[in-house]
Amino acid sequence: MESKQQQVGEVIDKILNSDQEILNSEIAVLSDLNDADLAKFRTAWQGVDLKKRLSLISRLVSITEDDLILDFTRIFKVGLDDQEENVRIKSIEGLELEDKYVFARTIVKVLKSDESEEVREVAARALSKFALMAELGDVPESVSQDIFNALLGVLENVKESLSVRRRALEAIAPFRQELVDDYIEDYYHSEDAKVKASAIFAMGLNCNSRWIDFLIDEMQSKTPEFRYEAAKASGLIEDEQAVPYLLNLLNDEDHEVQDAAIMALGKIGGKEAKQALQRLGKSKELRIKDAANAALTELSACEDPLSLNF
């Protein structure tokens, strides 16, 4: 029987130096590489064309989504040093799938130093997950502070692109601090529609009822994107004041707005919300029916967690 080291060597050669079809079971050998095998991989990686590098990183991300037991993080970290920005972007997406807070600092480093605006934007967006973990107390205080300081640094950097700064706003939103609230409100009043949409999105992640009046206003906006983001955000805040306005959005001309309203009603609950969802659950329109039934399932789980069958 071949040793893992022999298998790894063969798989690396097959993946990077041939056009043979590779099975997921073979790629799984690259999980949790030791130092020697990682060095071998890194050497082979440097001589491979972009198409193969990007294909492999993309596939590793896809496999990780389906099987979180496999650990390709050491390869993703190799990808962060790649000269091609698309490979670095995919590598960030791979690290974002991990629940290990240690990777937050790796992504912080990318946010601070990568030369590509698009890569920095993806890095800022990826930190949102770790910011939420930090606010929930699931990461050490030192790491939490590093995440917060990095995102705040982006917001304070007027030389940084607006696209990166608005992603930083979304990512920093879970931190319940007055300074964060000030930035959310400031961005909300922007004349740039994308920036304003990010601020509405951030209100939901901030989970503070102080934003409910803003969200109610935006659920009546002429702009579908604002209605959509406001509906989603109100669901995250779970304030019943939003229910009458969400009920109005059930007849919205934009299907995505309708779906967001249905989902929000399932999160907020209450008698009116439940009755509306039960009615929609009998709809002849399959999209509406499925969305309403999914929302009802979530609502039932919140009302009675023991009702779920595991």
Image (cartoon, grey):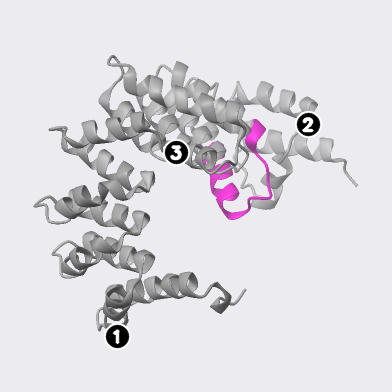
Q: Is residue 78 above or below residue 219?
A: above
Comparing 87 with 185, the one in front is 185
Contact? badges 3 and 2 (CB < 8 Å): no
Label 1 and label 3: CA atoms lie apart by 37 Å
Ranked by sequence position, the earlier of labels 2 and 1 is: 2
Label 3 and label 2: CA atoms lie apart by 30 Å
Ranked by sequence position, the earlier of labels 3 and 2 is: 2
Contact? badges 1 and 3 (CB < 8 Å): no
Q: Is residue 258 above or below residue 152?
A: below
Tag 1: residue type?
Lys
Q: Evaluate whether residue 102 shows in this view.
A: yes
> Among all residues in the image, which is located at the extreme top?
159
Secondary structure under the numbered disc 2 in the rendered image: loop
Secondary structure under the numbered disc 3 in the rendered image: helix
Q: Is residue 42 above or below residue 297?
A: above
Rendered residue at 37%/48% (across/down): 207
Tag 3: residue type?
Ser
Q: Position of residue 230 (x, y in %)?
A: 24, 52
